[in-house]
Image (cartoon, grey):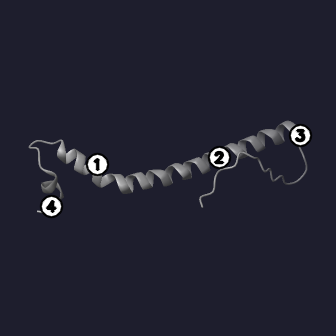
């Protein structure tokens, strides 16, 4: 089953605290970067599936809208 991105932040701090505002900014920036990476990965996976299954139907539709109008059999035949 595909994992879903979580909106919960999970800060992993190292060392001493420099200040609450600095930690919040760093945590927000890290969370934003992580969410952008997750959404980019999700989008690329979906785009791969769309390109994989949509290429041949797209070629057939473009071929059917060209002049002279071929039949579906002429488009699908290898000759």
Q: Which x, y percent locates residue 61?
A: 24, 46
> Which residue bears the numbered disc 4?
77
> Which residue bears the numbered disc 3?
19
User: Mark 2 or mark 1, which has the lower sequence index?
Assistant: 2
User: Mark 2 or mark 4, which has the lower sequence index?
Assistant: 2
* Label 3: few (<14), some (14–19) or many (≥20) C-alpha neighbours in 10 Å: few
Tell which tag, 4 or 3, sits nearer the viewer: 4
Residue beneath the point at 83% across and 42% down: 23
User: Mark 1 or mark 4, which has the lower sequence index?
Assistant: 1
Q: Is residue 58 left or right of residue 50?
A: left
Q: Is residue 16 left or right of residue 34?
A: right
Q: Does 5 sit above or below residue 24?
A: below
> Which residue bears the numbered disc 2?
35
In what element is the residue under mark 3? loop
In what element is the residue under mark 4? loop
> Which residue bears the numbered disc 1?
58
* Label 2: few (<14), some (14–19) or many (≥20) C-alpha neighbours in 10 Å: some
Q: Nearer the viewer, residue 44 or 57?
A: 57
Q: Is residue 78 left or right of residue 19?
A: left
In what element is the residue under mark 2? helix
* Label 1: few (<14), some (14–19) or many (≥20) C-alpha neighbours in 10 Å: few
């Amino acid at each position: 089953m595909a994992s879903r991105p979580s909106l919960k932040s999970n800060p992993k701090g190292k060392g001493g605290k420099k200040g609450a505002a600095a930690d919040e900014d760093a945590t927000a920036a890290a969370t934003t970067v992580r969410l952008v990476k997750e959404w980019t990965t999700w989008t690329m996976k979906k785009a791969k599936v769309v390109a994989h299954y949509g290429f041949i139907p797209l070629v057939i539709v473009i071929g059917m809208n060209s002049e002279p109008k071929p039949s579906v059999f002429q488009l699908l035949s290898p000759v």
